[in-house]
Structure formats: C-alpha cells, structure tokens
Amino acid sequence: MSPSSSPFHAVVVGGGLVGKSAALALSQAGLRVALLAPHVAPLAAGQLFDKRVYALSASSQALFERLRVWQALDKARLGPVHDMRVIGDAFAELHFSAFQAAVPQLAWIAESHLLETALDTALHFQPQLEWLPARAQALTIDAEGATLALDDARPLRAELIVGADGAHSWVRAQMGAQVKHRDYGQTGVVANFTISKPHAETAWQWFRDGEIVALLPMAGPYVSLVWSATHEHAAALVAGGGAALAAELERFAGASHGIFDCVSEPVGFPLALQTVDRLSGARVALVGDAAHLIHPLAGQGVNLGLRDVAALIEVLRAKERFRGYGDPILLRRYERARREDIAALTLATDGLQRLFAAPGFVARNLRNLGMSLVAAQPFVKRWLINNALG
C-alpha cells in the first residue's frame, strides 16, 4: 500500500506487540495513522509454538480487551498462571497465589505470534490506518509537523511520530535522547518443552548461582523456558541443543515437572538494562523497548511497554480541542504519566538481579532471609502481586 498524499495524525515506526498495539489504539481513537513495519512471518513448518512468549498482566489484558483483540484470541493457546513459586539459592521459597490475592489469575502466558496475528487482523480492518512495509531514512521536524523520508523516496507527513522500533531505536536516535546502557553479562536462553507431569498452571523461578531459571505454564502439557545465564554458560546451553537442555532441567525441576521433551531448539538473546533521559521530544513519543529495557526476571518488559501505549492514548484522548496531537504540552503529560511506573519497575528488576548475582555467603544469607520475611507477610505479598498485575 502506498502512502497517502494527505497528512497523518500519527505515524508509528516499528511493529512488534507494542508498535502494533499503539497503531491500533490510535486508529480506534479516531486518528489517521500510518504504521511503518514489516508484515509478520508465519510460523515455520512443523513449529508448534512461537519461541517468544509473554506473561501478560491484568493491565495488558485490559488494554487488549479495549482494543477488541483479546476476544479474538484462541483461548486454547492461552495458559493461565494461578500460582507462582520462587525458589532462592538456599531453598527459601515464595509462593504467590491468585486465590489468596482474590484475582482470577496472576498472568496469562501467550505466544508472540498468537497476539501479533490477532493484532494484524484488527489492523487490516481499520479504515483510518495505512500499513506500510517501508523503512524510514530521515526525520525532519518543523513548526507544523514532522516529515519522514521513506526508503522509496516518498515523504510521509504527520503531527506525531511514535517510536516503537525497539532497543536500538532509530527514532530515538533522531530525537537525540541520551541512552544509558549496561550489559548484565547474561544471555536469555529460551525454548519450549512438553512435560510428563501436569504443570498445574504454576510458574516456577529458581535462583541458582547468580543465574535465573523460569518455567512458564503454557496451554496443555507445555512449558516455556527463560534461563538467564552467563554468556559462556548460555552459549553451552544453546550449543548442546534441546535434548541436553531437557536433561539439565530434569536434574533440578524433574520433581515438579517430570520428563522434559524439547519441542523448539534453544536460542539466546543478550540481556541489558537501558534507560533514556526523556520519553518525548519535538513531535516524538517513545514507547516499549525504545523507551526502556529491563531484565526479564519478572516478565514485565512487554507489560511496561503496553502501559506506555495505554498512557499515550489516554493523554491524546483527553487533549484540549485547540491542541494538535504533537503538541509538546501533551507529550510532556505523557512523559510525566509514565516516569514513576518505569522508574519503579526498573529499580526493582535491576535490584533483584544485582542481589541474586552478588557472590558470597553474606549476600546469600541476606537475600534468602529477605525472601523468608516476605513469605511471612501476606500484605507485602499482596502489594507485590498488585504491582505485577499493573
């Protein structure tokens, strides 16, 4: 589809879950929107599940319900999380229960491909939206709006540019935002497995020698692994293949899960902390990984990005009639609305990673004592659950 000659209210640069959600939300709010993103590729032949899965919080579910995407999902491929067990490196344990928290579930485990396919379908039915599988090459800002030069040499004019183009965001670079990046010295290894024992809709997380192993319950007899390991160990886990990784998991998780059989070969991705000095600039707003990157130990990265989308839409819906969608006052309102949530979750995930990566007997005793104290305080556990639910 070629760009329209008339200007857009907003252009979303970048696809993925957050970018497509932003484009859909903006168009449903009545804006004329362009989405610059490639089309999603189908699952490979014989691939049962997408290797990328997300633990969706209540806030993310609520956003998808408002977008009428949740109702279109195949519920047979959604895995509810009713319990979560966190095991420390000295076997201190935390148990979080949806029943005790009086909520239907703590999270939903959903494949990226399942969610993106439903978003794609909804996007194709938006008359206010044009989906352009093109790349932006230049951004020019002036008093009346923003102009994107595409790789087909045609200009795209808009009041607002939304940067949803990931951790290495091109839009963020054009905006001139300052980025602080710290490598955790870890790689996240992901793979999917069948298990011989019922997972009882329970998520497990083990802290082991500075590494974090999470098993997330998918629909049916499947679990998804996210193993935050040192680069060297992660390389060995990936190189060993699915069968070796299954055997390794059985050695410490077999009592709860039984026999593991790998159904998707492991792959790795580097883990880092990344923050930016501002979420907005002249006619530009950042959402998702373009705005923040956190450790996956709490499974909250995508939820944080979807809350960016919800906040941006709320600000734009509430704008005064005399303001344009790229008005700097509106963009500062969006930034203020997001700063506290982003800062709190960044601090919490980074602090936990540092705590459990710290070597030595004293650090080990302190963190496991802390877990034991939290386990004995139901009000603290309820507060943690409420924050995770968003």
Image (cartoon, rainbow, N blue to C red):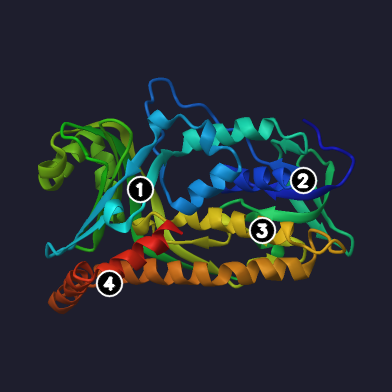
Q: Amino acid at mark 2?
A: Gly
Please tell me which residue is depicted at 19% across the width and 37% down the height of the picture.
Answer: 246
User: Mark 3 and mark 2 in contact (Cβ < 8 Å)?
Assistant: no
Residue 355's spot in the image, x, y percent? 27, 72
Which circle's residue, 2 or 3, is located before the other in the chain?
2
Residue beneath label 4, please? 355
Left or right: residue 308 compared with residue 273: right
User: Mark 4 and mark 3 in contact (Cβ < 8 Å)?
Assistant: no
Residue beneath label 1, please? 105
Which circle's residue, 4 or 1, is located before the other in the chain?
1
Which circle's residue, 3 or 4, is located before the other in the chain?
3
C-alpha span from label 4 to label 2: 46 Å
Left or right: residue 293 compared with residue 124: left
Q: Amino acid at mark 1?
A: Gln
The label on residue 30 is 2
Q: Is residue 302 visible?
A: no
Which circle's residue, 4 or 2, is located before the other in the chain?
2
Please tell me which residue is depicted at 56% across the width and 48% down the height of the picture.
Answer: 63
User: Mark 1 and mark 2 in contact (Cβ < 8 Å)?
Assistant: no
Secondary structure under tag 4 reads helix
Which circle's residue, 1 or 3, is located before the other in the chain?
1
User: Mark 2 and mark 4 in contact (Cβ < 8 Å)?
Assistant: no
Q: Of residues 94 and 152, which is closer to you in this image?
A: 94
C-alpha span from label 2 to label 3: 13 Å
